[in-house]
Image (tube, grey):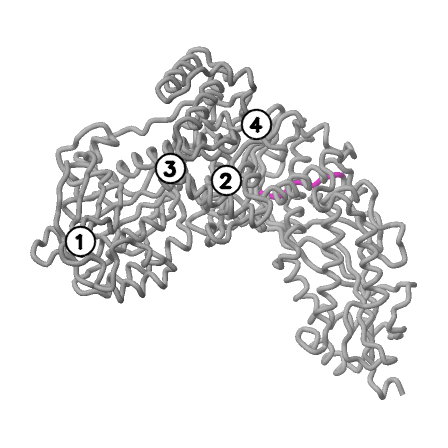
Amino acid sequence: MITHLRVRTRSRLPKALAVLAGAGIMVTSLPGLTGAGFAAPGNTAHFTTGKRCDEMHLGKKFPRTPANSGAPGSGQYDVHQGLPEEYFFGHDAKGFDALPPPTPQQKAQIKGTDKKSLDKEIADWDAKYAKSGDADDKAMAIYARHKRNQVTASRPTKDFKRWLKNKYITNQQNNHKGSAFERKTVKDFNMVGPDWLCEVTVEIRDKDGKLVARRKYDAYNQNKGQFGEFKSDGKYRRHQYKADEIILRHKDPVDPKKDFTKNKLVMYAGEKINNATRTNYRDLNKALQAEPGRAGNPVRIYQRQATGKGVFKQTKYTRSYPVMNPNPNKGSMGPINSAAFDSGKTFKEAKQYQREYIRANTRSALGRGPGGVDFSTLELQYVGNPVKGKGLDYSFKAGYMPDEDNTPGYGGQAKLRLASDAMFTWLALTPDKFWVNLNPDQPDKIMDPTFGKTDAGRVLLQADLQMKHDYARDMDPRKDPGKKYWDAMRAAGLPCGHSIRNWIVPKPAKVRVDENGIYILDAPLKVKSAPIDFTTPSPNGKCDLTKAQVQTSQRLVNQYILPDVEKKVNSSPEYKDLRRVYKSRVAAEYIRQQDKDRPSDFHPIINSNTVKRWPLRDANKNWTPRQTYDDYVKSFTKGDYSYPCEYNGQQKICIMGGVDFSKQPERKISRIRFQIEHPRLDTTTKTSVRAETSYRNTETAYLGGNGSGRLPDGGQPDPTPTPTPTKDPSTQPTTHTPAPSTPPTGGGEHPSVPPKAPDGSLPNTGSNTPVGLITGIAAALAAAGAALIWWMRRRKTAED
């Protein structure tokens, strides 16, 4: 059905320019826009509709449109508060994401030279694969598709791997996921009956026929005058926004049926919308509300969290990743792996990948893109029960990037590998090797030689040195907290500071252990301090204090200095790697405990003292513990900073510190408390093993996988998409609160025997070591991580 409407619009260019300028959109690039207004008299609007929504997506026509049709509520941004939902779509191309380029022999098998002949070959190879199930037959069909791209595309992609990833696999995901989400949205919101039309195209042309704006809307309610846009990824498209801004301002002063200023737009989002989407449509809504004749919210966003899971058959050409995999011959699979390894190693590379994604994401069904995750915040949050032959499920948490198109996240591969390598390091090495020691008197005892060959050991030693520098900055008497400390020292009549040992220990870790695995809810760190003496001289000289004076000085350090240093350790970017490897240690200890009772794939690794699979990597591959030790000695003997202090004419400070996770207190979390404080986290975690998802409408992403090389995405070795049952909304209106669903059982079986600590506490390890978070250090050396503040501040009267 095609209808032509002639529409005249009133000029509102000044307001529109203000709105678009605030949203960062250049309206001058749009054809047909002049100083006279968005559309001069004589402009026409053209509608081209597809089919009724119920017929197109549900396969039947309903006699009427129910009263509860469309998005509920009336706010500009409404969020459905029901349980997270999931839907499935076929994605067999994903099963061939590691397919190598064709060999000369395989190229020779493809005889077609034009589209028609190549289409026939593709159909023949697909039919053969359907009958044989042989992955090599499907590979030939894919090779033929690539050749068709070379023959028919205006801009063919010659590089096969790039075409495979950015064209073949991405296009299938975009189309199949988009279609599945459209079906789900039509059903969930009762977009049935004669009022709802789908795939409505609107064009605005000027009197000369020149295109001003074109927009294809997923749905249109003829009775309410409401456009609907379905976004499974919750992310707007800039060119669509430009068209919306123009179309919603068109008006015919004579015919009210052609008055678009009465129309509304609703975006139906399936995932957490990003900041750019929220900001732009919020501003457009405000601008339209300020115009005469507008009522309510002309532009609305309704978010109903639903995770799309691609279903595919795993083949010998399915990509796996060398992280979180106990068996070196089997890689892991899952959304965190592909997201991290495809994120780009540098900002420049990430920008390139994100641009390619934007070009491919024609239906806005692919998610935020490779730059959508802030990998600098990536931490392991969950591991399931290890089962022999099945690895274990795992899930990571990270923040979203607020504007991934312009400032994409990157470096995911390095962060994921660090977390994975650290977990295996804690499993492989025996606890007597978990120590580091920065002591100026002990250059031969920096750390265990084997531990020093790992990134986990490097992170701990460098975090120790970083803490010394931060301690030094906080001792500066020219600003707080150092000023308060030295004021208090003067008030107490103390002429100088004392030798100090500072080190990092865990605070009570909050975990939940149930029959499925361990949830690492919170793992804060604490900075401790105690007096100590060293033989290595300080450049500031010596200051003798009585025992009582030392105790007073230590009390003031604890009161004024340590809280700020501890805050940095738990929140500053400089310690992100320390917090990352610490979470991995919690997971490793849980795996140790489970493996004791039921030997798993991790059994050969535990206490093997072999870390060749998890060495120092990339830019740190040539690092040695001595490098960090030498930096520390320089700091200790020459000082980090010079402060205005009156002691022998020198103004210096020397700092040392340490990290000690040899003992870990635990905070027991019951099931009820877990459900109250972290509602739906278990459901979110299970979903994340197979698909990226957000937690309860927050800016936090959960991405997981399985380390056995088994399918995480469909649940079964040869899955098929689960159809959505269709009921008649005209007789049985649906509500907007979905019933709880049972997650698929794929990703490994879980033993029915519960862990030893069903109340939520983490079991002990060894004979007397609580919670084995022996992530650390100094377990064998009493002086490990010793720290010295030698900052002399004498009064002239004291010196005299």
- Coordinates of residue 614 in the picture (x, y in percent): 71, 37
Kindly identify the residue that appears in the image at 63 percent across and 54 percent down. 524
- Label 1 sits on a secondary structure element that is helix
Could you tell me which quadrant the C terminus lies in?
bottom right
Task: Identify the disc placed on residue 260.
Answer: 1
Q: Amino acid at mark 1?
A: Phe
The residue that label 2 is drawn on is 685
Task: State the residue position of label 4.
Answer: 751
Q: Looking at the image, which residue sits at the far left?
A: 254
Numbered disc in front, either 4 or 2: 2
Q: Amino acid at mark 3?
A: Pro
For the residue labelled by badge 4, is the local secondary structure a helix, a strand or a loop? loop
Q: Residues within 10 Å of mark 1 (few under 14, many from 20)?
A: many
Q: Judging from the image, what secondary structure is the residue with disc 3 in?
A: loop
Q: Residue at left 51%, top 45%?
A: 352
Given the image, on which type of amino acid does mark 4 rest? Pro
Between discs 1 and 4, the one toward the N terminus: 1
What is the spatial separation of the Cα atoms under label 3 and label 2, in whole angstroms?
Answer: 15 Å
Contact between labelled residues 2 and 1, with CB atoms less than 8 Å apart:
no
Q: Nearer the viewer, mark 1 or mark 4?
A: 1
Instruction: Give the Cα distance between marks 3 and 4.
Output: 24 Å
Q: Which residues are magenta?
A: 760-766
